[in-house]
Amino acid sequence: MRLKPDDMARLARRFVRIRQFEDARRLCTILLKTAPDHPELADTLSVCANGLLHAGERDKAVGLLPHLLRLAPDDMVTRALQRA
């Protein structure tokens, strides 16, 4: 079964809420590849990176930094990752 980009974005954010960060990160990666212009992509990546940071997974969160710099350069999470 193939998920639509909207569903992937919602599911990734839900995974973050229930602290399933690896699943959320995988969905973000797929979303980046399949729907790089999705309107919720920046917010979804930001939520995922923030969750990873709070879970102590800084290295995984930093992996999203290049995409956040492009999509949400002024976001609080992007600035936090730049300092990390």
Image (cartoon, rainbow, N blue to C red):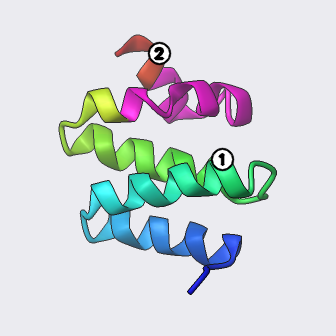
Instruction: Say which element carries label 2.
Output: helix
> Residue beneath label 2, please?
82
Mark 2: which amino acid?
Gln
Residue plotted at (78% across, 58% down): 39
User: Going by the image, does 15 lie left or right of 70?
Assistant: left
Image quarter for residue 58?
Answer: top left
Instruction: Say which element carries label 1.
Output: helix
User: Going by the image, does 79 lie left or right of 33?
Assistant: left
Residue farthest toward the left in the current orientation of the protein = 56
Does 39 appear above or below 5? above
Mark 1: which amino acid?
Ala
Residue plotted at (62% across, 32% down): 67
Q: Position of residue 76 (x, y in %)?
A: 53, 32
Residue farthest toward the front in the current orientation of the protein = 1
Residue 69 magenta-drawn? yes
Q: Position of residue 12 (x, y in %)?
A: 47, 66
Q: Earlier in the sequence, mark 2 or mark 1?
A: 1
Image quarter for residue 15?
Answer: bottom left
User: Looking at the image, which is closer to me, 4 or 13?
Assistant: 4
Residue 45 magenta-drawn? no
Q: Residues within 10 Å of mark 1 (few under 14, many from 20)?
A: many
Number of marks drawn: 2
> Residue beneath label 1, please?
42
Residue plotted at (61% across, 78% down): 7
Segment colored magenta: 61-80
Q: Residues within 10 Å of mark 2 (few under 14, many from 20)?
A: few
Q: Position of residue 54 (x, y in %)?
A: 25, 42
